[in-house]
Image (cartoon, rainbow, N blue to C red):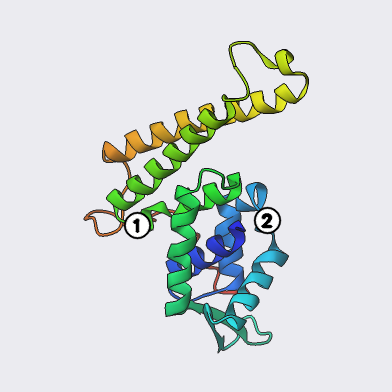
């Protein structure tokens, strides 16, 4: 699973309709170009590909007051919305998901009801714990990696990663259980208040 599709679909949904520059600006403001493949070329490519696949509708709109050709604004279709939530749920629940996919999922977790987000994160935690149990069938962390040769370093890395990710996931679950953040359907400030970058009216796609 690639993070770019989840990131782009999620960013377009936040605006309702958005052009490529807005999406790029949002994702760069979140640092996504540093921790994922959300580079400018990838963003524009993803927008065009998902429009071809029926996940987005492309609207040609008038050029900005600065002149230039008409730009394209994108809107998520019903099919795109279904795909978005499928990707989001997978990103939050899959213990084997790459870090950029997990990060994208965390970034949009508030689009789900609180209890559903918690259930998905608990599923991820169970997967991490099960994975560690499987690894230590062949590798004893107490004895260290030398016991089985240098490949033991690989297994040691797996155990370390599963344990550290489990600690982080438990912490996140605890914060969400304690009422942190605003999730879908809850009263209060918008979940993404202060997150979106103001649009530059002169910007071109």
- Nearest the viewer among 157 and 59 is 157
State left or right for residue 122 relative to residue 5. Answer: left
- Nearest the viewer among 3 and 200 is 3
Which image quadrant is residue 54 in? Answer: bottom right
Q: Residues within 10 Å of mark 1 (few under 14, many from 20)?
A: some
* Residue 87 - label: none
Q: Quadrant where the C terminus lies?
A: bottom right
Tell me what residue is drawn at x 51 percent, y 67 percent.
9
**Whether residue 175 is visible:** yes
Tell me what residue is drawn at x 35 percent, y 50 percent.
117
Distance from the alpha carbon under mark 1 to that under mark 2: 24 Å
Q: Is residue 46 above or below residue 92?
A: below
Across and down, in percent, residue 32 comes to 60, 52
Give the residue pinned by disc 1: 112
Across and down, in percent, residue 180 comes to 31, 41
- Nearest the viewer among 117 and 198 is 117
State left or right for residue 160 relative to residue 111. Answer: right
Tell me what residue is drawn at x 61 percent, y 61 percent.
4
Q: Is residue 10 above or below residue 145?
A: below
Numbered disc 1: secondary structure:
loop
Q: Quadrant where the N terminus lies?
A: bottom right
* Residue at the extreme top: 143
Across and down, in percent, residue 31 comes to 60, 49
Give the residue pinned by disc 2: 37
Count of numbered tags: 2
Which of the two discs, 1 and 2, labels the residue nearer the N terminus?
2
Across and down, in percent, residue 202 comes to 59, 74
Numbered disc 2: secondary structure:
loop
State left or right for residue 3 relative to residue 191. Answer: right
Q: Residues within 10 Å of mark 2 (few under 14, many from 20)?
A: some
* Residue at the extreme left: 187
């Amino acid at each position: 699973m690639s993070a770019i599709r989840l990131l782009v679909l999620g960013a377009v949904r936040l605006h309702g309709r958005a052009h490529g520059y807005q999406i790029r600006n949002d994702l760069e403001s979140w640092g996504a170009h540093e921790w994922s493949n959300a580079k400018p070329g990838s963003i524009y490519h993803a927008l065009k590909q998902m429009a071809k696949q029926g996940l987005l509708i492309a609207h040609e709109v008038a050029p900005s007051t600065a002149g230039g050709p008409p730009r394209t604004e994108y809107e998520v279709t019903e099919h795109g919305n279904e795909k978005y939530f499928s990707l989001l749920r997978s990103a939050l629940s899959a213990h084997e998901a790459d870090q950029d996919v997990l990060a994208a999922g965390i970034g949009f977790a508030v689009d789900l009801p609180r209890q559903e987000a918690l259930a998905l994160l608990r599923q991820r935690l169970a997967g991490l714990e099960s994975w560690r149990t499987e690894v230590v069938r062949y590798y004893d962390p107490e004895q260290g990696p030398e016991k089985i040769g240098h490949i033991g370093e690989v297994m040691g890395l797996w155990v370390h990663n599963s344990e550290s990710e489990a600690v982080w996931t438990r912490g996140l679950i605890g914060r969400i259980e304690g009422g942190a953040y605003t999730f879908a359907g809850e009263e209060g400030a918008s979940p993404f208040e202060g997150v979106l970058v103001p649009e530059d009216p002169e910007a071109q796609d």
